[in-house]
Amino acid sequence: MFEFKVGSYPIRVHWSYLLLIILVLNARFGIIGIVIWLAVAFLSILLHEFGHAFMVRRKGAVLNHIMLYGLGGVTVWNEQYGSSVSWKDRILISASGPLTGIASGLAVFAGIRFGLFGEAMQSVVTVPWRVGLGLWAFQGAWISFAVASLVWVGLMWGLINLLPIGGLDGSHILGEILERRDPRDGRKTAAWVGIIVAGAAAVYAVVVWRSWFIAFVFAMFALNDYARVNDQPPPFGNIRS
């Protein structure tokens, strides 16, 4: 466990965070590419958690710490004694993380389109979801690779976290909404939605992306939701929150 602070925000990094390496081992980015990608992922995921943490404090709750582990992170917080955070504010706290990540990715993409990173990137990167990581790595253009990675991780991590599957921000948002409508079974209904969406995503990962590892990750999300349906602790904890 590695601990440090950024301003008044306490950060903890668990050794399991290195699992992110698996996502790029088959991409043939080389040692330099993997190191850059891990640094960019660290920065992007930390920025995502800062979005949560900032909103936690904005809504009058107590921030304990930010933890980076596994394939992402979690912002741990508590309500202050004698006060409570409304369900609408909980939704804002959940949404602030992915929205911060998406905004950061779009900001870097805007910089590319305005030519801040050179004409080559401006001519190649025309849409934010096609940044050509492999292209820049193959050419050894590591600065361009880092910039493109900032766009890709910011956008994709933010969008994936909006999916309503076990432990992700989208699941928390859906759970808050459905629990408001159905206090008894709203959370279970959200979990069933998560099982269906995660299962579909796992199939898509195998058929389209041909990635058994990503399919395995979505399968873990589905198992977490299945545990919630049965009122059991998630077997993999809050994979991301």
Image (cartoon, rainbow, N blue to C red):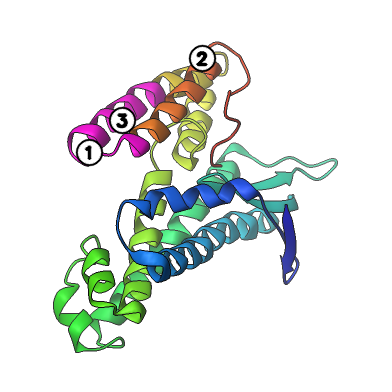
Q: Which residue is mark 2?
A: 229
Residue 74 seen in the current view: no
Residue type at mark 3 is Ala
- Span colored in magenta: 193-214
Based on the picture, tell me whether residue 25 belongs to the magenta stretch.
no
Of labels 1 and 2, earlier in sequence is 1
Most frequent secondary structure within the magenta stretch: helix
Taking 208 as reference, is 85 left or right?
Answer: right
The correct choice, above or below, for 175 with respect to 52 in the image is above
Q: Which residue is mark 3?
A: 202
Residue type at mark 1 is Arg
Give the Cα distance between marks 3 and 2: 19 Å
In the image, which is nearer the foreground, mark 1 or mark 2?
A: 1
Residue lying at the far top in this picture: please name it: 230
Q: Which residue is mark 1?
A: 210
Element assignment for label 2:
helix
Q: Residue at x 18, y 33 (%)?
A: 207
Q: Quadrant of residue 47?
A: bottom right
